[in-house]
Image: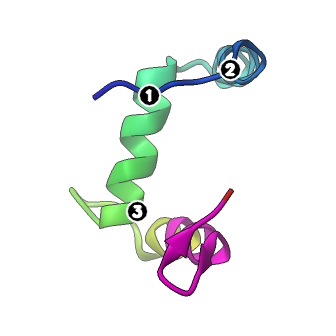
Amino acid sequence: MVIKLTDETRNELKSLCKEIGITPPELVHAFLEDLTGTPGCGSDERDRARDWLNRHLFGNEFQW
């Protein structure tokens, strides 16, 4: 999987991850596990990840 990011987004992501002590791939992996409910994430995390997704859906189109 390749994710295209602007330099600004990439730098902000690196800073955020550094603050919390994880790598960007670990953050993306954790979010995707929460979003999909695999493996063993809590229901609160799943609900919040899905809330995020639902806020970006307009009809069947994803917008950010």
Q: Where is residue 51 in the image (x, y as percent from the top left)?
A: 60, 76
Query: What span is colored magenta in the figure?
Result: 49-63
Which amino acid type is shown beneath numbered disc 1?
A: Ile
Judging by the rendered image, the residue that carries numbered circle 1 is 3
Which amino acid type is shown beneath numbered disc 2?
A: Thr
- Locate the N terminus and report the quarter of the image it occupies: top left
Between discs 3 and 1, the one toward the N terminus: 1
Instruction: In the displayed orientation, state which residue is furthest to the bottom.
Output: 59
Q: Where is residue 37 in the image (x, y as percent from the top left)?
A: 30, 66
Q: What element carries label 2?
A: loop
Q: Is mark 3 on a helix, strand or loop?
A: helix
Circle 2/circle 1 CB separation < 8 Å: no
Q: In this view, does 18 lie above or below 57?
A: above
- Locate the C terminus and report the quarter of the image it occupies: bottom right
For the residues carrying marks 2 and 3, which lies nearer the camera in this image? 2
Between discs 2 and 3, the one toward the N terminus: 2
Q: Which residue is drawn at 23% across and 59% down?
A: 38
Q: Which residue is drawn at 51% across and 22% down?
A: 24
Q: Residue at x 72, y 24 (%)?
A: 9
Judging by the rendered image, the residue that carries numbered circle 3 is 35
Using residue 7 as the reference point, say whether residue 2 is left or right of it.
Answer: left
Judging by the rendered image, the residue that carries numbered circle 2 is 6
Which amino acid type is shown beneath numbered disc 3?
A: Leu
Q: Which mark is residue 42?
A: none
